[in-house]
Image (cartoon, helix red, strand yellow):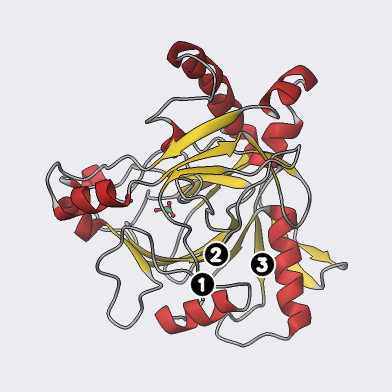
Amino acid sequence: MTELKDASLGLDVVPLAGYIGAEIRGVDLREAHEPSVVEEIQNALHAHKVIFFRDQEIGHAEQIAFARQFGKVTAAHPHEESPPEGFPEILPIDSRRYESNLGRKRTSYDSSWHTDVTALINPPAASILRADILPPFGGDTAWTNLVAAYENLPKELRDFADTIDIKHQFSTRAAAGSQRDRKVREANLVTYHPAVRVHPVTGERALFVSPGFTRGAREIRGFTPSQSEGILKVLWEEATRTEYTVRFKWAPGSVAFWDNQATSHLAISDAGHLGYDRVLYRVTLEGDVPKGVDGRSSESVSGDPFYGS
Ligand code: SIN
């Protein structure tokens, strides 16, 4: 692997794949960074879509403090009921909880490609995930670059995708009748988002199709269910082509910081069946309401915006 000193950023940035992902070295996330360093990290985030830090000795408080340097931090999740005591911003991704919450053992809450919480009218701008307990092998996460996915479509398909809106909804994966199942149904988050969203900072166009949140409804506004299904299958496949992805092997103290406006990710579920535990902690930054290429905004069907502080 070639280590590149990115002169324009002044950070040690090691790209990990052709379209997405870079490891940033020599930054201690416990520190309060100068605004210029925060800006450099943010630039690296927008350039590489997901950035990784290794060997960070941070806990919940430091993770939240690091996140606050980049925006408003939301509560853990619209459906989270038991964040760690004193840390309402922390979402535990904890295999030990899923058996009771979801009715089956698994290593992450979702094992499909998704962009975080796109059932919201304002999905998070970014997520920061820190690894704590990991299986001895397996349990990696992959990210895909949705800007590359959009830009490499044939022009006719790009022009078509620019015009359509897709229904995103939160499908309960919890055991029927469980407390979590009730909570998901009560909150009932449903939103139509443009299939192509314009990034609020970079102006790039991203193929915003979040399979995990659009697979339930399978609905493109104005199209029949079978038409919607056919079109969505093409777009999901394009958004998750292997060449646009990077796969990250976690170790305790690894941190991934992704631009949730330009990526989807997948928790690779290859460790749960072996009985290993996997515990990570996530925080999310408040996002804005997506806009399509013609300036139209996403439209909420139900559910409230999710603000941070
Ligand atoms: C997430 O979807 O935010 C968590 C990903 C993972 O468990 O690897």
**Element on which disc 3 rests:** strand
Q: Are marks 2 and 1 in contact (CB under 8 Å)?
A: yes
Q: Nearer the viewer, mark 3 or mark 1?
A: 1
Give the residue at mark 2: 286
- Give the amino acid type for the residue marked by disc 3 in the picture: Ile
Labelled disc at residue 24:
3
Q: Is residue 237 above or below residue 146?
A: above
Give the residue at mark 1: 73
Residue at 66% x, 71% y is: 25
Query: For disc 1, does the CB lie below 8 Å from ligand 1?
Result: no
Residue 73: image x %, image y %?
51, 72
Residue 82: image x %, image y %?
25, 69
- Give the amino acid type for the residue marked by disc 1 in the picture: Val
Residue 230: image x %, image y %?
51, 14
Single out the residue that lies furthest toward the left.
177
Distance between the Cα atoms at labels 2 and 1?
6 Å
Q: 195 left or right of 281?
A: right
Labelled disc at residue 166:
none
Residue at 75% x, 29% y is: 152
**Which one is nearer the viewer's eye here, 300 or 74?**
300
Residue at 63% x, 73% y is: 70
Distance between the Cα atoms at labels 3 and 1?
22 Å
Which comes before the other along the chain, label 2 or label 1? 1
